[in-house]
Amino acid sequence: MLKEFDIIDVLGELIMINGKPKRIMHDNGKQFTSNMFKRFLEHNDIKDKPIPNSYPQLQGNIEAYKR
């Protein structure tokens, strides 16, 4: 499992390559709910969009995108 600083490193690299996204959609994993991750999003003016627990179809969309 990736930790919050791993997620921030990967996200920083993706931003350098592809530009800054307006919104990040994610599950409610610990790495995405950490204060460090939230501060990173705020500092970079990126909106936070957690997937609702009652809508697992979105989780499948994210997993398919990562492959």
Image: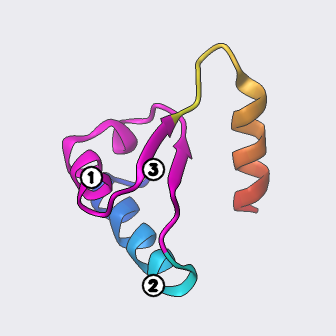
Quarter of the rendering containing residue 43: bottom left
The residue closer to the viewer here, 23 or 50, is 23
Magenta stretch: includes residue 29 = yes
Q: Is residue 51 above or below residue 18?
A: above
Name the amino acid type tagged 3: Met
Secondary element under disc 3, as helix, strand or loop, is: loop
- Dot 1 alpha-carbon crowd within 10 angstroms: few under 14, some 14 to 19, many 20 or more: few
To which residue does mark 2 refer? 16
Name the amino acid type tagged 1: Glu
Instruction: Report whether 34 appears left or right of 1.
Output: left
Q: Residue at x 56, y 44 (%)?
A: 25
Q: How far is mark 3 from mark 1, CA to CA?
A: 24 Å
Quarter of the rendering containing residue 61: top right
Q: Residue at x 51, y 57 (%)?
A: 22
Instruction: Report whether 38 appears left or right of 51.
Output: left
Residues in magenta, as a range: 20-49
To which residue does mark 1 refer? 42
- Dot 2 alpha-carbon crowd within 10 angstroms: few under 14, some 14 to 19, many 20 or more: few
Tell which tag, 2 or 3, sits nearer the viewer: 2
Magenta stretch: includes residue 11 = no
Quarter of the rendering containing residue 56: top right
Name the amino acid type tagged 2: Met
Q: How far is mark 2 from mark 3, CA to CA?
A: 23 Å
Instruction: Report whether 25 appears left or right of 11.
Output: right
